[in-house]
Amino acid sequence: MSTCIFPELSSVRIPEGCALRRDYPLPEPRRNDAYIRAFDSRTLIYDALSLSERRVRLICPRLLNLRSALREGLQVDGVAARIHRHHKSLRFEVVDLECSPQSELSVALPDVRLSVPVHEKTDIFAHQNVAMTMIKNTPCDWIVDWARYHVSAHGLQGLLLFDNGSENCDLPHLADRLSREAGLSSIALVSAPLPYGGNAGGRFVAPAKYLQVSLMQIARWRFFARSSAVLSVDIDEMVTPITGSTVFDAAMEARFGLGLLQGTWVYPPQAKLGQLQKHHTLWRPKEETPCPSKWCLARGGLADRFAWAVHRPGGPLHSFAQTIGQFWHCYATTTGWKRSRPNGVADTEIHTDAIEAMSTHL
């Protein structure tokens, strides 16, 4: 049986009754209903964690116009907090405070004071090869098969799942199945029912999608601080076997400790969505648009000094990183929660490598 935990985030959101809101980066004439519904106008802090006896780190979405409200409102034991460092990235911000993790941390806003729980780093993934991904209303069978495959094909040991507000996924039930069926050593299931965000809406417009990249930084600093190597792929993405090695070993040996994975679409014989990964036994021999790359990274390597990202980790080193393998992007393993895919796909052929890998590792 696996070690399984259900950690909580220190999410701090502006109450509905407070008029303070994050401004939309996109000008009003260019916003549509989908953009407005997906935008996170109220989250100030995603998580707070202890870095040392005198340092606490906050991981926040891009604050934009909320920056001064957060900085001026942060309090430690009722006194204005001392900010050691405030770093701004494209989709997230990091605020390091000079205070003890045992102090009472809060944010004072007009007419309300919001508590900020501080969490210790999680150590269950120490010295393990791990994976992280996000789910939303994802069938348990897909998740369990995805984990079983990567345990068998690549020696995956630990799994961190962020659940983005699933309405039909029982996390304790999922944890039980993963623990009994997947062969993992350690599992963490984190509930993150926060706005996912949408596309920026145009070139030269600040991003409106903060959650996924911010959760990656939380994984980096709170959950995987002592892990060996980290794999970042989605549930519909299966890393192809590497002869005589694993994706984690390849990343450890790669230049800068960063290995890129190039994606190829695979398809099931039946033209309908919502199918298991192992049913994807077809491919298209003609050229088609490649999938954006994914990655596996060695903790402590040169590339690990830079922020993690969905497709381009390693900062300036990304362009020089090695490709260490491929992944199959399973076309029909989707609930369409991000975007829909057409049902029918023509001009396909039998994919013997995918058939062999799925039958061997599932």
Image (cartoon, rainbow, N blue to C red):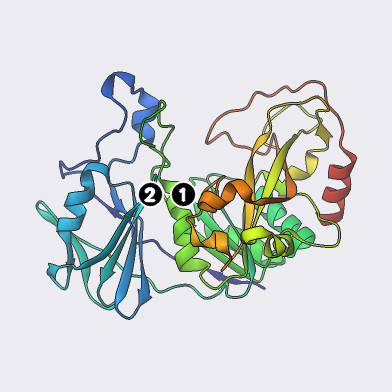
Residue name at image x 63 percent, y 61 percent: 257
The C terminus: image quadrant: bottom right
Q: Is the residue marked by circle 1 packed among few (<14), some (14-19), or many (20+) residues within 10 Å?
A: some
Percent position of residue 85, x then y: 28, 63
* Label 2 or label 1, whichever comes before in sequence order: 2
Residue 157 appearing in the image: yes
Q: Secondary structure at mark 2?
A: loop
Q: Amino acid at mark 1?
A: Val
Q: Quadrant of residue 90?
A: top left
Residue underneath mark 1: 213
Q: Which numbered dot is residue 89?
A: 2
Q: Nearer the viewer, residue 62 or 352?
A: 62
Question: How far is the residue under mark 2 from the one under mark 1?
Answer: 10 Å
105 displayed left or right of 52: left
- Position of 247 with respect to 198 (left or right) is right
Residue at point 47%, 48% (across, down): 212
What is the x, y in percent for residue 40?
33, 41
| Residue type at numbered disc 2 | Ser
Can see residue 182?
no
